[in-house]
Amino acid sequence: MSSQDDVTVLVNRKSGGQKGDAILSEFQAVLGMERVFSIVDVGPGPGLERAWKVYEDAKGEVPFVRVIVAGGDGTVDWVLGFMEEKLTKEMAKVMALMHLPLGTGNDMARATGWGGGYDGGDPEGVLRDVLAAEPLTLDRWKLTMTPRKGDRGQEGEGAEIPAGEQVKVFANYMSIGADAAVAYNFHHLREEKPHLFKGRLVNKFWYGTSGLKATFRGQVFRLRGGVSIIVDGEEVRLPRRIRTIVLLNIPSYMGGSDIWGAKKKKVAPFCMSGEEYELQSSGDQKIELVGFGGPTHQASVAMFHRKGIRLAQGTKVHFSFETIRRNDESYAQVDGEPWLQRGEYEATVEPCARALMLVKRR
């Protein structure tokens, strides 16, 4: 049976609005420097190598090793991506991650029962809960984007990656439209003025400000007529008022909203008529498509945890993006990483990997 000495801790000390350093120190005080790693300084590799050594030393007595990842959703993505790219499949499949939430949205932590934020002060309690937690299979999804011939792809001011075919992997969600435009504005404000972002509540205020900016800049517009979607071979008919489409893998979005309705089945209202949706699961290799209306609907989701509009559920999703407006711009994001997309393009989303996450015992 595992003890707290077998737990490895990876801390993003830049998360948590000035609290990351303190949390790194408190875990090092309990477990020692050799079990707690600052991944900003050394990357995920040394900590994961230590976790693998724990598994090897156990000689088959434990089915998996427990790794705490302290940071935001982006930090969890960073570690998962490193595991898929750098570790062998044998190593990656025995590492179960716990998301200790230090970021703003912390949707992975919310979906797995660890709450919306950890402010420090109780590392022993965290370790007790981690040792009692159970593993959950988590699907990872691959987004492949291909600009149509002659189009420019991702470029221009603020673009993060060059034009041409691009591949991104995500675990929580992908979205296009209004909410991605808001995330884009928020991301660039934080890059330009990091001193304004000192905690989760303050960050949420600036997120709301970014939403107003998206509305007044004309970044919010209808997607119907510019986006066509096929899910498992069936075309999805978009309601006229849809301005955001979310592909959701976990039952938490935008800081804790269950926009699909994880505990309920419902007859499909806009596609695959007469067929019931299955209950949402993070490990069934199916992804849920949910739509939002304008800024008012989106604000009600964020503030009052309202549901979105169920659109479809399936394993393979194909998008075709046509020119929607004169300036030929649209916005997209995966797990909070937004970008500006120019031109017409095709996109495919399909399962690509699996990981283990630890779920808090209730």
Image: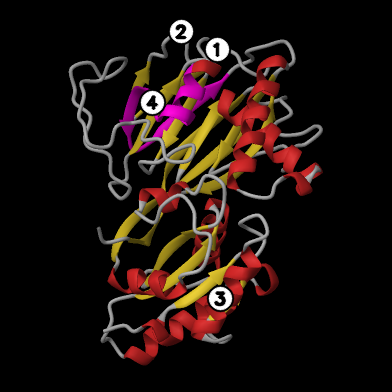
Give me the disc on residue 245.
none
Whether the magenta-drawn stretch holds residue 242 is answered as no
Within 10 angstroms of label 4, few (less than 14), some, or many (20 or more) residues? some
Disc 2, SS? loop
Q: Say if 242 sits above or below 78 in the image.
A: above
225 and 50: which one is in front?
50
- Identify which residue is drawn at 56% across, 81% down: 28
Q: Could you give the CA–CA distance between mark 1 and mark 3, rounded to whole angstroms?
A: 48 Å
Question: Which residue carries the number 1 mark?
Answer: 222
Can I make out residue 218 in this image?
A: no
Residue type, mark 4 in image:
Arg
**Foreground: disc 1 or disc 3:** 3
Disc 3, SS? helix
- Identify which residue is drawn at 42% across, 79% down: 7
Question: Which residue carries the number 4 mark?
Answer: 306
86 and 28: which one is in front?
28
Mark 4 vs mark 2: which is more N-terminal?
A: 2
Question: Which residue carries the number 3 mark?
Answer: 26
Q: Could you give the CA–CA distance between mark 1 and mark 4, rounded to whole angstroms?
A: 20 Å
**Foreground: disc 2 or disc 3:** 3
Mark 2 vs mark 1: which is more N-terminal?
A: 1
Question: Pointer 4 and pointer 2: residues touching (CB < 8 Å)?
Answer: no
Within 10 angstroms of label 1, few (less than 14), some, or many (20 or more) residues? some
Question: Which residue carries the number 2 mark?
Answer: 240
Question: Pointer 3 and pointer 4: residues touching (CB < 8 Å)?
Answer: no
Scheme of colours in the image: secondary structure
- Identify which residue is drawn at 40% across, 35% down: 257
